[in-house]
Image (cartoon, helix red, strand yellow):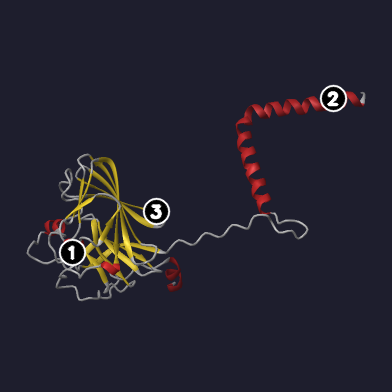
Amino acid sequence: MPTAFLRLAEGLGMVFRWRFMGSRFRFLLPLFLVLSSAGLGSVAAQEPASHGESPSDPPPKAAAPAPEILVAQTTLPNPVKDVIALIHREQFSGKPDEPITSLPGIIRVQYSASGFGYAWDPVECRLMFVWQGGADMSDLKFVAEGPAPFAATIGAWGVPDYFGYRLVDGAPEFLYYVGSLGVTEKIRPTPDGRGWTQDWEIHQADYGLQVTIPERWVSKVKASAGDWIGPVLKLPESKVAKLTLTWIDADAPDLPELAASWNGKPKSSPENEAPKSESETKQDE
């Protein structure tokens, strides 16, 4: 058989096999091309310049590591004396005449590098207290008092309904309902370490918002929107309202009267210890 004929038959067989495979796997071709081009691009970007020439663009800088944030649901001693700030815990305790000395189920958040920490209460759905200094919570900066922030807002009725939290850049974002208001809340230290911010996103604020803060903090808190009338910040109606309050340590007023059980430094016990990082846990093992 002539050689030219054999080569032609072999070529036709390859074409038929490719068409058969293409009919079954043609949906993979775009993905293969994308992955191939991405791989070639990454290799080309990493290939050093030849002949000792420096690349035209400087190498990308490594991203700064995210701050180590420790989150734990635990029991903490209670510095809050104002019964209004603990109204739902008072009701659920079944012992309204007895002071609340501890806060079981509270969420403790600690920034290990800066020492900034706070306690957020899923029962009251509010920030309870803020401190500076790591595991030692004696240096309190803020303690809750008075009604909850959205208590004066139309639609914020009944017991708040806590749904949980999600991590955003390693920090918790709390999700809850207050009446018909759907709320997300984030609390973070300011970049300069001189205070903290409280970021809210409020859904279904159909009749506007009235955000109440402790009266002693009036004129010492900066708001991203709204108008102050005494200790109440008023915002117009909105389907989705966004608000940031900035609290600065240097402007912090004196603390309110603290609970008699608060001795300035929490007792050392397993449930009151600061949560350990993964590296610390491995060292203990």
Q: Are marks 1 and 2 in contact (CB under 8 Å)?
A: no
Secondary structure under tag 2 reads helix
Q: Position of residue 164 (x, y in %)?
A: 30, 51
The CA span between labels 1 and 2 is: 93 Å
Q: Secondary structure at mark 3?
A: strand
Q: Which residue lies under the disc numbered 1?
A: 216
Which label's residue is closer to the chain start, 3 or 2? Answer: 2
Residue 24: image quadrant is top right
Q: Name the one closer to the observer, 140 or 58.
A: 58
- Location of mark 3 (residue): 168
Say whether residue 116 is left or right of residue 78. Answer: right
**Labelled disc at residue 8:** 2
Residue situated in front as seen by the camera: 267 or 223: 223
Residue at (16, 73) in percent of width and height: 261
Task: Locate residue 128, reporting x and y percent.
Answer: 23, 62
- The disc labelled 2 sits on which kind of residue? Leu
Q: Nearer the N terminus, badge 3 or badge 1?
A: 3
Task: Classify 130 as above or below 14.
Answer: below
User: The N terminus is located in which quarter?
Assistant: top right
Say whether marks 3 and 1 touch (CB < 8 Å). no
Q: Nearer the viewer, mark 3 or mark 2?
A: 3
Choose top left, top right, bottom left or bottom right for residue 102: bottom left
